[in-house]
Structure formats: C-alpha cells, structure tokens
Image (cartoon, rainbow, N blue to C red):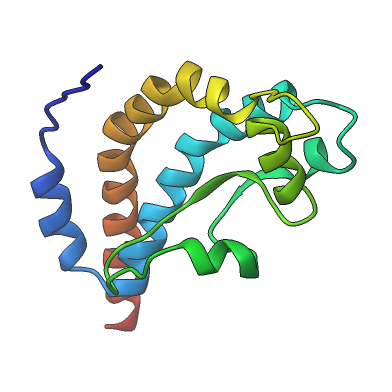
Amino acid sequence: MTLSMKLEGFKEIEITLKQLPRATAKNTGRRILRKAATPIAEAGGSNAPRDSGGLVASYGVGTKLTKSQKKAARGLSKSQVEVFAGPGEGGYQAGLQTEFGNEHQAPEPHLRPAWDAHKNDALEIISSGYWEEVQKVVARYARKLARKG
C-alpha cells in the first residue's frame, strides 16, 4: 500500500517561523504536534489491555523519552521537533510485549489500531491548525516587541 499526499502552505509557515526566535518557533511546533497526537494516545490507552500493570495509565503525549527509548532514537537538527505518543515510563516494556507479543503471549495491538484510526485526524489538525497557531504566536511576539519599545 502506498500513501501519497500533497501539502501546501508549509513553506510560508517555515518562512514565518524563521523570523521568530528558535525556541518560540520550536514551541509552536510542539504545541500543534501535541494537539495532533493526543487523540492517538487516548485511543491507544483505551485499546490497551487492562491486565498489564501501569500500561493504560502510562499512555500520553510528550517530548521526552526514557533512557532505553533514547538509544533507539536518532538525533535531530536544532530546528526540528518531535513529539511522542504512546506508553511512557512504566508502561513502555509492557506496551511492547502486548503490542507485538512474545514467546509467552500472543500480540494484543493497541497503539497501531489507534494510529490507523486517527492518523488522518492528526494530519488534519496539523494542516488546519498550524497556520492559526503561527499567526497567534506572531501576534504575541509583535506585542512583546512593542512593549519593549
């Protein structure tokens, strides 16, 4: 199966974000990505098996990884942001075991079905909400500069 899409307007967003301080631009990206990833994490948590200790409670959206997750993650450039949705510390190992199974247990997928069900919603949130978020940030930044004189 091949997925293809055409994104328009992101070049203008990139140009606008480059006019802001890097931290402000990155925080803007994180905010919209968190908003887009939240339905996936919520669905994954509700799909997760209840008998796996803290798996359900560990589901969330964030920018930090556990030590074991960091080993597998690649480095980013200073202008890139990543947001993670799924089981966090305390549920990560249980999540892997139940999602994919092991020699003692059959797989019980919970995050993959959540992704499949909500990936288009996430893309819609990003495509429709990113420009609005950038405009709000630019307006706040302009007010801040005006106060400074």
Tell me the quarter of the image containing the C terminus. Answer: bottom left
The image position of residue 65, as x and y in percent, is: 59, 62
Residue 60 place in picture, x, y as percent: 66, 44
Residue 138 higher or lower than 95, as above or below: below
- Quadrant of image for the N terminus: top left
Picture residue at 16% right of the left edge, 23% below the top:
4
Q: Quadrant of residue 87?
A: top right
Q: How many marks are shown on the rendered structure? A: 0
Q: Residue at x 37, y 56 (%)?
A: 28
Up the image or down, 135 lies above or below 118; here it is: below
- The residue located at (27%, 32%) in the rendering is 127
Q: Quadrant of residue 47?
A: top right
Q: Nearer the viewer, residue 26 or 145?
A: 26
Q: Measured along the vertical axis of the image, is residue 8 above or below residue 4?
A: below
Residue 87 higher or lower than 70, as above or below: above
| Spot occupied by residue 67 in the image (x, y as percentages of width and height) | 63, 70
Residue 12 shown left or right of residue 75 in the figure: left
Residue at far front of view: 103
Residue located farthest toward the bottom when viewing the structure as drawn: 149
Instruction: Tell me where residue 122 appears, x and y as whole percent.
Output: 41, 29
